[in-house]
Amino acid sequence: MKINYLLLNIIIFCLTANILIAQDTSNTITVIESASSTVVTLEIDGMACQEGCADKIASNLNETKGVISAEVSFKDKNGVVTFDQNLVSIEDLKSIITSTKVKDYEYTINSVTTKDKN
C-alpha cells in the first residue's frame, strides 16, 4: 500500500513539474519591422505635460494597427513614429494625434519629416 501511495505521489509530482515547465514565462517583446516601414517625426503643439498629453498620444498611436512604435516627447514637442505605410498613412497618424482627448487640450501638427527605413 505504501508503494502505491509513493508511486501516486511521484506521478502527481511529475505531472505538476511538466505543467510548470510547459508554461511560457518569458516577457520577451518581439518587434517585427516590415520592409515597407517608414519613420516620421511630427512636430506637435498643444501638449501641456509628458504624463498626460504626450503619453496618451503615444498610447493611442501604439494601439493603431500598422504602428510599429511611437514615442512622443513633451519636452521636444514631437512624436517619432515607425509604421507600416501599407497599413496606416501619415494622414491617419495626424488624425489620431489631433483627435486625442486629454481634458480640453487641442493638438496641432506643425510639420512632418519622413524618412524611409529601407
Image: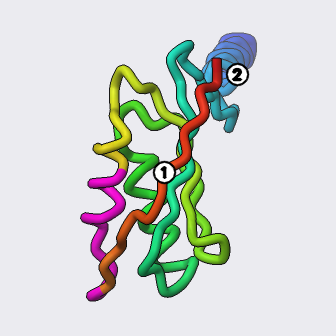
| Between 13 and 9, the one nearer to me in the picture | 13
Give me the residue at 73% from left, 17% from top. 10
Picture quadrant where residue 100 is located: bottom left
In the rendered image, is residue 7 in sight? yes
Judge from the rendering whether residue 101 lies leftward or rightward of residue 110; answer left or right: left
Q: What percent of the width, then of the height, locates residue 46?
A: 42, 80
Q: Does the magenta-highlighted stretch encompass residue 99?
A: yes
Instruction: Give the amino acid type for the residue marked by disc 2 in the picture.
Output: Ile
Q: Which residue is mark 2?
A: 21
In the rendered image of this protein, does residue 75 appear above or below residue 4?
A: below
Boundaries of the magenta span: 94-104
Q: Earlier in the sequence, mark 2 or mark 1?
A: 2
Q: Which mark is residue 112?
A: 1
Judge from the rendering whether residue 66 lies leftward or rightward of residue 33; answer left or right: left
Give me the residue at 47% from left, 68% from top. 44
What is the CA distance from the residue labelled 2 to the residue labelled 1?
49 Å
Whether tag 2 and tag 1 are in contact, CB under 8 A, the answer is no
Q: Does the magenta-highlighted stretch encompass residue 73?
A: no
Of helix, strand and loop, which one carries label 2? helix
Picture quadrant where residue 91 is located: top left
Instruction: Give the amino acid type for the residue marked by disc 1 in the picture.
Output: Val
Q: Which scheme is used to colour this image of the protein?
A: rainbow
Give me the residue at 34% from left, 32% from top. 88
